[in-house]
Image: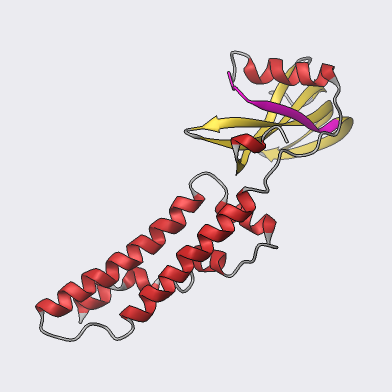
């Protein structure tokens, strides 16, 4: 009984899994699908969950046969459910992936494009992309930030320009959208690089089909 319990653990884990969450989505849940299925490795993770559960059921069948006892009654039902899950995930993945486009350009300001290109392709980063759009226009901001360390409260005034570009970049064999926040600090904390454009934040978003990058 202990052996059977251990073997079927991946099947029991399905109930609260992110894979089950994805299978409850509909094509209208585009943001949730992008966040849970179209990121790098997301699709493979869910397929691995299904594969491991299938293998657990098969392993259990082999053990039951060796022990001369009937297989778990729910095995066939779970396999059928896993088939449904796989079909649902593939359908959601293909439907929403085909609709993914680059974000709309907030501006076509060539100066901002040139600044971003210089920062991203420079020796500090050396990124390469197939397409770039400025998806958030330049803004000037002033703010105070405070932090506490060693019994001392430090307050610094930040004055900077900020804009964001989205780039379509190849990762392995596929393309993904990256969001890059570019900033120019005129003042900041003691470790803030000032008086030069720099990459302040960057994150990888969803996959995009190569044929849709220019659309």
Residue 67 in the image: x percent, y percent?
10, 81
Q: Is residue 160 above or below residue 78?
A: above
Q: Is residue 147 above or below residue 5?
A: above
| The quarter of the displayed image where residue 28 is located | bottom right
Give whichever of 210, 111 is nearer the camera. Answer: 210
Relative side of 150 to 44, left or right: right
Q: Residue furthest front?
A: 211
Taking the spot 70% from the left edge, 15% from the top edge, the residue there is 118
Relative side of 160 to 62, left or right: right
Confirm whether the magenta stretch covers residue 27. Answer: no
Q: How many marks?
A: 0
The C terminus is located in which quarter?
Answer: top right
Q: Is residue 32 above or below residue 191?
A: below
Residue 71 in the image: x percent, y percent?
22, 82
Question: Which segment did they paint magenta?
Answer: 126-137
Relative side of 117 to 172, left or right: right
Q: Is residue 3 above or below residue 213?
A: below
What colour scheme has been applied to the protein in the rendered image?
A: secondary structure
* Residue 13 in view, yes or no: yes
* Residue 17 in view, yes or no: no
Residue 31 in the image: x percent, y percent?
69, 55
Residue 48 in the image: x percent, y percent?
39, 57
Taking the spot 66% from the left edge, 62% from the top edge, the residue there is 27
Relative side of 8 to 92, left or right: left
Give whichever of 47, 209 is nearer the camera. Answer: 209
Taking the spot 77% from the left edge, 25% from the top edge, the residue there is 183
Confirm whether the magenta stretch covers residue 130. Answer: yes
Taking the spot 80% from the left edge, 38% from the top edge, the residue there is 104
């Amino acid at each position: 009984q202990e052996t059977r319990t251990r073997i079927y653990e991946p099947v029991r884990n399905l109930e609260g899994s992110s894979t089950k969450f994805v299978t409850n989505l509909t094509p209208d849940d585009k943001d949730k699908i992008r966040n849970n299925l179209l990121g790098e490795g997301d699709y493979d993770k869910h397929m691995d969950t299904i594969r491991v559960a299938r293998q657990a059921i098969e392993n259990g069948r082999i053990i039951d046969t060796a022990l001369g006892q009937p297989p778990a009654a729910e095995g066939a039902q779970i396999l059928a459910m896993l088939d449904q899950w796989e079909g649902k995930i593939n359908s959601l993945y293909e439907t929403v992936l085909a609709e993914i486009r680059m974000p709309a350009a907030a501006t076509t300001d060539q100066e901002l494009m040139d600044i971003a290109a210089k920062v991203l392709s420079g020796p500090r980063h050396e990124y390469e992309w197939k397409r770039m759009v400025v998806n958030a226009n330049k803004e000037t901001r002033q703010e105070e930030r405070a932090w506490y360390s060693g019994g001392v409260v430090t307050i610094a005034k930040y004055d900077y320009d900020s804009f964001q570009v989205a780039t379509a970049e190849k990762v392995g064999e596929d393309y993904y959208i990256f969001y890059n926040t570019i900033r120019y600090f005129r003042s900041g904390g003691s470790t803030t690089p000032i008086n030069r454009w720099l990459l302040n934040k960057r994150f990888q978003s969803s996959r995009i089909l190569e044929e849709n990058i220019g659309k």
